[in-house]
Amino acid sequence: MSPFAFLAYFFAFGEVVEPYKQPLKEGLTLCVFNDDTLIFSDKGKWLTPLFALEEFLQTYEGDKSNLAAHDTAAGKAAAILMVRMGIKRVHINLMSELALSYYLANGVEASYEKKIEKLACKTETLLETLTDSDEMYRLLRLRAKLVRGVSVELQDASFGYDGDLLFSNLNITLPEGERLLIQGDNGKGKTTLLKMLMGKLEPTSGKVLIDGLPPSQIRSRTIGYIKQQQTQQQFPVSVREVVSMATDSKLSKERQKWEIDTALRRVGIQNLQDRNFYTLSGGERQKVSLARCLCQKARLLLLDEPTSFLDSTSRQALLETIRALTLNEMPTIIVVTHDKQLEKDLAWPTLTLGLKEKEGGDHE
């Protein structure tokens, strides 16, 4: 600390007040320091400054080992976000007991000017009894509308061939960014349902709506489809070339390159980018397909039997990638499978086809 900074932070009783504990400048609601250096500030309200900070830290190349934050107010929601971003010390003008408990439980040094039992907001109430950090983070992104996904709705949808129904009166309502796992034995219409969502098949009766519109009317890049991966050898094409096929051709070459690099890094396959796609394992191919959907900026992801042909290592890697997508990009995701273990691993809301659809088959 410079002599001038020392004098500036020297208050009564000879105590040096650390920079992050200094009063916030007029208009600012959040300041973040690395050691004594201010690296970020914002004037927003609610959780907006913290989500802006999260985005800033994704590209910030400086040291992040000793982050400290001063915020005007912090409930449990703010505490969850700060802990997730690796902030080590906080000073809060108005802090709730829920926030203080969460900070302390996660090893964050916390001080405050005034403490109250609970902030008077719905988010604080919703989080009060929750403990899973990932689910709480998802809830916050949903409430902040930081969701890529689109809504999906089936209204009394039925489908069949020559009068023989695969399923009938199927009702599904998925808000933006939600997840659904569809189970069912072979021949019960799981893949048929995906084709209906993609607009390749029309329901025999009822409606299918994506973002409030029939599938035929939505934008071409809205839906990303990841089919079962086969193992046969085909023509040589690199992983990077496969992913690049999904980029928007209207973007500049520099932007396209950035989006490809980001997608490869996002799913952890930068080291595979020069490999022949058809020499990869099933799990690696699934990751490439996910990276392609990220480049596409797909708002609805449809995965058809994603764990077929995968060994245990590849299966686990795929699951981790899917879980990460549900926390960050947050597209709406529908996974079709007959893998009972996958249902347990994901612990998502589940619809079973062939199980009394004639009585409604509702899912919300």
Image: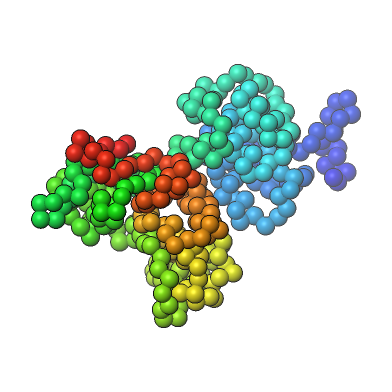
In the shown orientation, is residue 163 left or right of residue 225?
left
Position above or below: 12 against 302: above
In the picture, measured across the screen, residue 110 lies left or right of residue 309, that is right
Q: Quadrant of the N terminus?
A: top right
Which of these two is toward me, 168 or 12? 168
Asked which colour scheme the image uses, the reply is: rainbow
Residue 304 or 101: which is nearer the viewer? 304
> Residue 115 placed where, x, y %?
65, 21
Query: Quadrant of residue 102 in the image?
Result: top right
From the image, which quarter does the C terminus lie in?
top left
Q: Residue at x 54, y 72 (%)?
A: 273
Q: Is residue 71 rendered to the left or right of residue 337?
A: right
Q: Residue furthest bottom?
A: 235
Front residue of this view, candidates 292 and 361? 361
**Residue visible at 57% across and 37% down?**
133
Establish if 160 lies above or below 136: below
> Could you say which quadrant of the image residue 71 lies in?
top right
The answer to whether residue 267 shows anywhere in this view is no
Rendering coords of residue 328 (x, y %): 50, 49
- The part of the image, by quadrant, that contains residue 113 is top right
**Whether residue 340 can be seen here:** yes
Which residue does the image show at 42% across and 41% down from the upper left?
A: 348
**What residue is at 16 percent from the left and 45 percent from the top?**
206
Q: How many marks?
A: 0
Task: Classify residue 4 as left or right of residue 20.
Answer: right
In the displayed image of the protein, which residue is found farthest to the left? Answer: 163
Residue 289 is situated, as x and y percent measured from the top left of the image, at 44, 64
Work out whether residue 207 or residue 337 is closer to the camera in this orientation and state it. Answer: 337
| Residue 209, placed above or below residue 10 | below
Q: Position of residue 172 (x, y in %)?
A: 28, 41
